[in-house]
Image: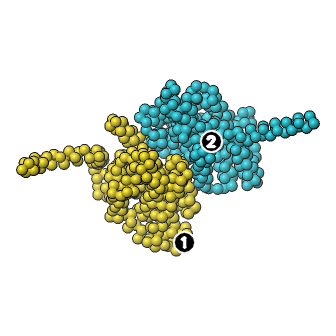
Chain colours: A yellow, B cyan
């Protein structure tokens, strides 16, 4: 009897309830920011940023940044940081490229098939990531310095693979990986996989727990060191994947190609609401954050605002996003 | 009998002096530096040990060394300054655009004298440092992120001023700070500036209340606050000092090569961190000494110089630096664990 009486009332509230829940959702603000930004930039550039070819361009650029930012998010969730993503990505990219190219830089003597090269690139990335992981989890070196050093090592190694020259004349089937349907699909599937790992597995819970409070995580039986080790491997593999996507999009690569990726990936996480103090944030935010940075970077180049604006705006965004996160946290207390 | 005991005492005295020298915190660094200089001299067939080249090393090291001293202030409080290279470029862009004699690159419409150009550079450096300092001390943004952002902003300011071009032909008196010698053909001016900065900062660290407060802030911010140290003001001040010294380092390099391009200062942040860390600064804050930082900078300078004489490519340099930094921080971390 009471149930019947209550039901219509509950149904009447669902529409409003859904709306309220949507507004209160953690990614609502950032989603609105993205929509507002796209609309505003579309207006300011008189539609130049909204042409289908440009939208495709933004998606492709965001895919490279996005997969790397997702790896970075795993590391930042444990209250560490990975500055080596550009160096590791370049190393994987040059290694893969040098296996496939038909030029003199080929290190194997024959052009290796894609099915061999792609796993090699991911493994190379994971290997460099595990170097970070060992330095941080076993030796206890602060992640900032360990990854700063590995960044340099990655660049040095990449230089030795290619002798500092740009890689070209890559096999044509490579282009499919980084072009329109494939790259965003890879980006979003990596995002979906990361979402499932972080929210529905024991490892994901450990990542949040370790980042929130390493001591209590340790006391509740979580292997803190192993968690650190794994997040750096994940970040390394995804940096390698970022290198693969970049290589196949441009079909050429120089050693300077991924410069600034560490800043972009950290900024994407910061904008996406991943707290730099660890333990707080979600992957959907990171995906939106990567796209926001892609939209801004693209608009700056479409509107010919120049390098100066690009640097200043990016610097202001990263400080602003982290400052906003900290201020929000303090208010909540 | 008595003579024997006197001899014995003398022996043990000289032994304890030797022991004290070897136990000194910088003994290892001096030995490594001497070994490096000797090793490089052998590897280059004596070229690197020539007096002319040693002076060059000192001049080249002065920019990195001065930046490393600023970096050491920040690291002493437990922070880190990644904006060094950006600030050096941004300020050098301003200074060179003010002091250039090429009409189309002048931002003032005339070539400013050095007494206007250099103070303007130092002021911009201190101002950019103050942005990091305020963001770190007031909003509590990690120093890493604040300086990563300011690095970009300063780089953008430099791009804005230079338009991405290389600026050359600065007014002639500027040369003195990078290429001058006192007396003519004697000791390099850049080296004197480095030594002067190091001596002043040594005095500030060990003989002023301010220096002790900086040490206290890095050692334990909570305790420092409770003992009356204005922790926020200390944090703000170290970033300003680092920005100021980055601008001074930029001045010297600009005066040495008499041209500024956007890649002039690439890698300076890693080099300055490496110098500070090799010199015994602990990244956890509160531990370090000024002499070590200068020795660390000289070590890197000797390595870079030797490798360039040997014709090694620049990427090998950064690899060596990366290994050195990880190695020295690893040793520091290992020591802290109580070995």
Mark 1 vs mark 2: in front: 2
Measured from the top left, where is residue A103 in percent x and y?
A: 52, 69
In this picture, is A172 found above or below B238? Answer: below
On residue B313, the disc is none
Q: Percent x, y for residue B58?
A: 68, 41
For label 1, the residue is: A108
Does dot 2 land on a helix, a strand or a loop?
A: loop
Residue found at x 34% / y 50% = A282
In the rendered structure, the residue with mark 1 lies on which chain? A
Residue at the location (48% across, 50% down)?
A83
Q: From the viewer's perspective, is residue A185 above or below residue B185?
A: below
* Residue lying farthest to the bottom in this orientation: A110
Which of the image's four quarters has the C terminus of chain A?
top left
Q: Residue at x 55, y 42 (%)?
A: B283
With respect to residue A96, does B114 lie above or below?
A: above
Asked whether residue A300 is in view, the answer is: no
- Relative to the observer, which residue lies in front, A162 or B116? A162
Asked which secondary structure carries label 1, the reply is loop
Q: What's the CA distance linking mark 1 and mark 2?
A: 44 Å
**Which residue is painted at 63% across and 27% down in the image?**
B207
- Name the residue tied to disc 2: B280
Percent position (x, y) of residue B187? 72, 36
Q: Are marks 1 and 2 in contact (CB under 8 Å)?
A: no
Answer with left or right where residue A41 lies relative to residue A156.
left
Is residue B136 at least partly visible in the picture?
yes
Number of numbered discs visible in the structure rendering: 2
Nearer to us in this view, B8 or A24: B8
């Amino acid at each position: 009897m009471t149930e019947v009486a209550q039901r219509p009332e509950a149904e009447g509230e669902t529409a409003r309830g859904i709306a309220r829940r949507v507004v209160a959702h953690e990614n609502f603000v950032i989603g609105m920011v993205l929509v507002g930004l796209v609309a505003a930039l579309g207006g300011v550039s008189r539609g130049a940023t909204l042409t289908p070819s440009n939208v495709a361009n933004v998606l492709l650029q965001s895919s490279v940044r996005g997969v790397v930012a997702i790896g970075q998010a795993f590391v930042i969730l444990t209250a560490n940081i990975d500055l080596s993503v550009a160096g590791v990505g370049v190393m994987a990219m040059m290694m893969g490229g040098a296996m496939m190219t038909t030029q003199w830089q080929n290190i194997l003597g024959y052009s290796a098939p894609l099915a061999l090269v792609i796993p090699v690139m991911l493994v190379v990335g994971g290997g460099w990531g595990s170097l970070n992981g060992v330095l941080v989890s076993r030796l206890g070196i602060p992640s900032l310095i360990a990854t700063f050093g590995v960044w340099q090592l990655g660049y040095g190694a990449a230089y030795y693979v290619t002798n500092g020259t740009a890689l070209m004349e890559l096999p044509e089937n490579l282009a499919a990986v980084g072009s329109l349907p494939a790259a965003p699909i890879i980006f979003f599937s990596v995002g979906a996989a990361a979402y499932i790992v972080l929210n529905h597995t024991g490892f994901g819970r450990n990542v949040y727990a370790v980042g929130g409070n390493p001591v209590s995580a340790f006391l509740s039986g979580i292997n803190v060191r192993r968690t650190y080790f794994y997040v750096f491997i994940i970040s390394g593999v995804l940096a390698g994947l970022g290198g693969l996507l970049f290589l196949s999009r441009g079909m050429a690569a120089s050693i300077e190609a991924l410069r600034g990726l560490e800043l972009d990936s950290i900024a994407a996480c910061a904008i996406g609401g991943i707290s730099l103090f660890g333990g707080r944030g979600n992957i959907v935010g990171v995906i939106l954050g990567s796209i926001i940075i892609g939209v801004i970077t693209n608009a700056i180049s479409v509107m010919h605002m120049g390098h100066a604006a690009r640097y200043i705006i990016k610097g202001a965004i990263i400080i602003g996003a982290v400052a906003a996160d900290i201020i929000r946290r303090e208010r909540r207390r | 009998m008595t003579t024997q005991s006197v001899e014995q005492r003398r022996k043990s005295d000289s032994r304890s002096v030797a022991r004290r020298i070897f136990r000194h915190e910088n003994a290892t660094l001096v030995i490594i530096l001497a070994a490096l200089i000797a090793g490089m001299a052998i590897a280059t067939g004596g070229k690197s040990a020539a007096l002319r080249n040693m002076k060059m090393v000192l001049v080249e090291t002065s920019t990195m060394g001065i930046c490393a001293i600023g970096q050491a202030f920040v690291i002493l409080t437990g922070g880190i300054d990644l904006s060094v290279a950006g600030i050096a470029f941004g300020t050098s862009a301003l200074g060179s655009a003010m002091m250039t004699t090429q009409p189309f690159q002048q931002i003032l419409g005339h070539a400013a004298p050095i007494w206007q150009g250099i103070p303007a550079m130092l002021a911009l450096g201190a101002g950019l440092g103050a942005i990091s300092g305020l963001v770190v001390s007031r909003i509590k943004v990690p120093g890493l992120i604040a300086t990563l952002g300011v690095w970009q902003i300063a780089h953008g300011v430099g791009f804005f001023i230079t338009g991405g071009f290389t600026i050359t032909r600065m007014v002639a008196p500027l040369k003195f700070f990078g290429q001058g010698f006192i007396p003519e053909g004697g000791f390099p001016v850049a080296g004197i500036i480095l030594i002067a900065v190091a001596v002043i900062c040594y005095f500030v660290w060990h003989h002023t209340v301010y220096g002790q407060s900086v040490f206290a802030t890095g050692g334990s911010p909570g305790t420092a606050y409770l003992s009356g140290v204005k922790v926020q003001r200390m944090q703000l001040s170290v970033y300003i000092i680092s920005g100021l010294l980055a601008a001074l380092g930029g001045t010297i390099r600009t005066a040495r090569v008499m041209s500024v391009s956007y890649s002039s200062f690439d890698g300076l942040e890693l080099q300055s961190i490496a110098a500070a860390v090799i010199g015994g600064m602990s990244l956890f804050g509160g531990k370090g000494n000024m002499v070590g930082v200068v020795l660390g900078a000289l070590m890197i300078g000797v390595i870079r110089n030797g490798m360039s004489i040997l014709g090694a490519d620049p990427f090998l340099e950064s690899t060596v630096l990366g290994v050195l930094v990880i190695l020295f921080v690893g040793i520091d971390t290992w020591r802290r664990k109580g070995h």
